[in-house]
Amino acid sequence: MSRYRIPGKGRIDHARPVRFTFDGRVIEGRQGDTVASALLASGIHLMGRSFKYHRPRGVVSAGSEEPNALIGTQRGGPDRFEPNTRATMQEVWDGLTTESQNKWPSLAFDLGAINDRLYMLFSAGFYYKTFMWPKAFWDKVYEPFIRRAAGLGRSPALPDPDHYASRNLHCDVLIVGAGPAGLAAALSAARAGAQVVLVDEHAEMGGTLLSEPQLRIDGAGAWDWLAATLAELSALPNVRLMSRTTAIGYYHENMVGLCQRLTDHLASPPADAPRERLWRVRAKQVVLAQGAIEKPLVFDGNDRPGVMLSGAAQTFLHRFGVKVGDRPVVVTVHDSAWHTAFDLAAAGMKVAAIVDLRNDVAPALVQQARTLGIEPLPGHTVTGTTGRLRVASVRVAAVSGSQVASGRRIACDALLMCGGWTPSLHLFSHTKGSLRWDAETGAFLPDRKTEACQIAGAGRGLWGVAAALDDGAKAGALAASAAGRVAGAGTFAVSGDRPGRGVVVRELPTDGNPGRAKAFVDYQNDVTAKDIRLAVREGMRSIEHVKRYTTNGMATDQGKLSNINGLMIASEALQKPAPEVGLTTFRPPYTPTSFGALAGYHKDDHFEVTRRTPIDAWADAQGAVFEPVALWRRARYFPRAGEDMHKAVARECRAVRSAVGMFDASTLGKIEVVGPDAATFLERMYTNPWAKLQPGRCRYGLLLGEDGFIRDDGVIGRLADDRFHVTTTTGGAARVLNMMEDYLQTEWPDLNVWLTSTTEQWAVVALQGPNARKLLEPLVEGLDLSDAAFPHMAVAECTVAGFLARLFRVSFTGELGFEINVPARHGRALWDLLWQAGQAHGVTAYGTEAMHVLRAEKGFIIVGQDTDGTVTPQDAGLTWAIGKAKPDFVGKRSLMRPDIVARGRKQLVGLLTDDPATVLEEGAQIVADPSKPLPMRMIGHVTSSYWSEALGRSIAMALIEDGHDLQGKTLHVPMEGRTIAARVSGVTFYDPEGQRLKV
Amino acid sequence: MTTHDREFRAAGVTVGELAPRLRFSLRLRPDNLPQARLALGLDLPEKIGGLVTAGQRRALCLGPDEWMLDCAEGDRPALPAGLPHALVEVTDREVTWRISGPRAAELLSIGIARDLAALSPGKGCRTAFGSVQAVLLREGEDSFTLSVWRSFASHVAGLLAIGQRELACGL
């Protein structure tokens, strides 16, 4: 079955077969295989269809830069499905299910491949040119077509059952990449005692060393040296090694995001194990040792299955013991592919030829090729390939000057290409570090740094393992020193190193018509060289425009293989040197990252903080329906059997008006304002006067912004000369405290007053209704509750049911009312006692909905519902709350601005529908005359609207232009299919004289 | 999740809710520290994060003019009336857990971004656990106390329990 597996070769466990499926077919791999290596071992190169043309595609690389071999993976049940997994990164295990993508009906025969025949229609910018007219086609034809065609794979349809973890981590030195440079850096830094974190995206650490076993380092074989190095590092307590961990982004202040894949490689993960963990690492120093990525060559037919990077073939051979073919041909402009060819030949593959565009290949390489029976073809190009589902032959031709001779065909079953190597600068780019063009290597190299980082090895253009080790050791020592350690860089004796050199080419020269060549630059987005030239011809000058017009580099691999080739072709077409054309910006994440990893613990119950009061559990047990208010959840109403919201709220309202209601008011914001200057401070903050408020009394407070608009309100009680108990709205608590602190610290630092949030110190139970005193009185000690001794708007400290309490006589309902504050831990006990005692008085629990109705019947505003940040006290009819004699308060000056006192402002009024049974929609717009032509002028909108059980009719509040002058006028509320007439009224609908408080 | 003294044992870390201690927020100008120290019998630290203990009283400095003052039940401290200050009881505002064991810091790192290695025993700080404001005290090398406002407690306790299961599962 695994004809292409070389027994005993590679780092996989040959004794442990692993069975998984690919498109339903059982594939046998070995423990340690990736899906790609296992498929190749079975002779399968065809792994997917391309995005636009549906061309058959095979694996190109052996790493995370893979553009073609993107597969769907299913781990266990159908809900554990992920599209676009890179087959080169997914490890195999017994039972793993994989599928190819973007094909129908099958991978080998795909009807979508018709696009390939129509390629002239699908040139660069075809979206912009094709889907223009007729306009009516957009909804029915174009958009559905684009949506179906867009994206590879299928989206998961079921909720993700996995969970995801997050961690914060601090260290001295974070090293990204565990190849020779990263390992050497880790040794320097770790031996110096630095806290070191070394991460690598692969299952195994070692990088290049895994593919270069012939190397000898310090007298040991590369793999022995690797094992000893990893053993030394993992034995050190100051080192953390993390494999299968991708550094996805490099952010400000040396924070690097890591995504660690914990379970995708396991057949049976432990219960409770998170699938992935996102690490937020704050490192004193970062060492980027990401290495280099091999460049593909651009030529006609460079995308057939079997055409792949030469370094990938070397990795499949040495790491996985897999032959990528029986008879490969190599095409290159760099020495490294010659060495690959030699390794392949040594492993028993019949390498037919090495095609090298260069005339001046080192004689030693040519000689060695001959010795191994490989035909060396220096000064040659590749002008085409054949083969439908697998490359079958390659056409090679001699090049002299600009002349390409007529070619000949060489049969092959794999074509290994090498266009040189691109330093991997993605993370460095995230930091906005600048790049410089190195003409000699034809690559961008890191230049000016913006973060505390070192770049080592091939990432800064140093080729060869010896150079990478030395450079890494120095970078590690520098990083450790910068982090405050005494560090030195070790040296390494390396033999068998094959650094090599090469040249930079744009496209391989051809004798064919470049306008018809299917010479791919971006495999994943199906962008060809001619697309890039077309974009330039059509006027794109900036590389950013070329990128967006052609979509080159915009696939999920972010152009890891295509950007540099695209740039070279664009620079030739623009006749500008590469550095002037510039490189597009890499952005996080480095490789595609699951939403789960980013969301972390923010799912299910922990999606967002839910704040609960001490009485929440009681309400829950009573079957309350909750609503979110800021981060709190509050009981909205308490339905009994058979009741809908309307019936429940009506019953709750009746109970408050006729007997007594109990309400959990614990969420009200509370700020204790204490100090000799407490009254002075409140005088300046609130519109109302406070200096003469006596201890033991309360007052309604109105808070404005500097602009004169209402920000918040609440009752404020004076407990002592120097101590106030301020209440705020539930949602405004934090905002008000911040605003107060802001003024205190920046405007009046001289005041001796301090603010303490006590929202959560107190649980608050409101008793409202004619029976409130009867219920409360027997439970109170140390206070006379009579109207004379404890009138409306009084506050006192006493005990209630044995608990120390701050008792307020206040009313947000218009009924006799008390708010009992007790230390929060006693809130539930107090509630239970009142509930029990209240049964004799007809007590009923009511929620926020009834509270809203009851306050609207009295015309009390809710900040944020009846105000919208542009409403002044005059607009809201609250001028009575302004201390006229006060010299100043926040917002006072603004209240006199011409625009604030001009006519035409929206003012708060009541609205009574002509039909008392009609309840207006909150938010509905209001017009003066519905017979006017459309579009009519809207003069205001409904802010609050309810069925009033007490009045037996609907009531509403509205903000209407010059509303205070429209008393008694009929206005209109246009709704779908009908227009509702309503009369403007005052806002106090119920008990306007306030008689019900005087008991 | 917030039952008193209910402990969750997992690999290397225990989380237990502590019974409430009498707790005050004390605010005063640094100039008045000498008088306040005298009145409280407590050498209020001046450096943010500093913690001092005297008998049953201990104070953690949380800001240039702010201290968290913990006292024994029934011990209600008082400062001279003529000394401008604010002393506000916040005993019931917070829920406090003890998080202890060799992996205590690791568990906390699921929610706390600060470098816990830089918080030495006997120091504390105001910080955030996830998105929740918290006060963290390092009581010993492997022992922390974490306080959050009461209404956030079930959220934080739930996260700590998830974190413990994660540590226990070994991945």
Image (tube, coloured by chain):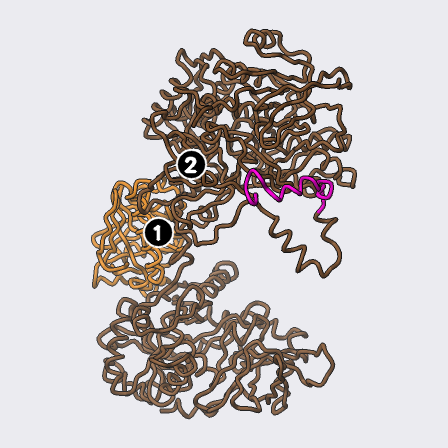
Chain colours: A brown, B orange
Task: Provide residue B142's location: percent of width, then percent of height.
Answer: 26, 42
Q: Residue at the location (39% across, 24% down)? A: A192
Q: Which mark is residue A743?
A: none
Residue B107: quarter of image: top left
Give the amino acid type for the residue marked by disc 2 in the picture.
Val
Q: Is residue A499 visible?
A: no
In screen coordinates, is B128 left or right of A417? Answer: left
Q: Nearer the viewer, mark 1 or mark 2?
A: 2
Q: Quadrant of the C terminus of chain A?
A: bottom left
Chain label for disc 2: A
Chain label for disc 1: B
Q: Which residue is mark 2?
A: A26
Task: Provide residue A487's location: percent of width, then percent of height.
Answer: 42, 22
User: Depth check: A619 or B26 in front?
Assistant: A619
SS class, disc 1: strand
Give the amino acid type for the residue marked by disc 1 in the picture.
Cys
Task: Provide residue A990's location: percent of width, then percent of height.
Answer: 47, 90
In screen coordinates, is B73 left or right of A369? Answer: left
Per the rendered image, the range of residues in magenta is A103-126
SS class, disc 2: strand
Q: Residues within 10 Å of mark 1 (few under 14, many from 20)?
A: many
User: Depth check: A682 or A507 in front?
Assistant: A507
Q: Which residue is mark 1?
A: B61
Task: Provide residue A402's location: percent of width, then percent of height.
Answer: 77, 19
Q: Residues within 10 Å of mark 2 (few under 14, many from 20)?
A: few
Above-or-below relation of A176 to A965: above
In screen coordinates, is A605 left or right of A538? Answer: left
Examine the structure image and report whether residue A650 is included in the region drawn in magenta. Answer: no
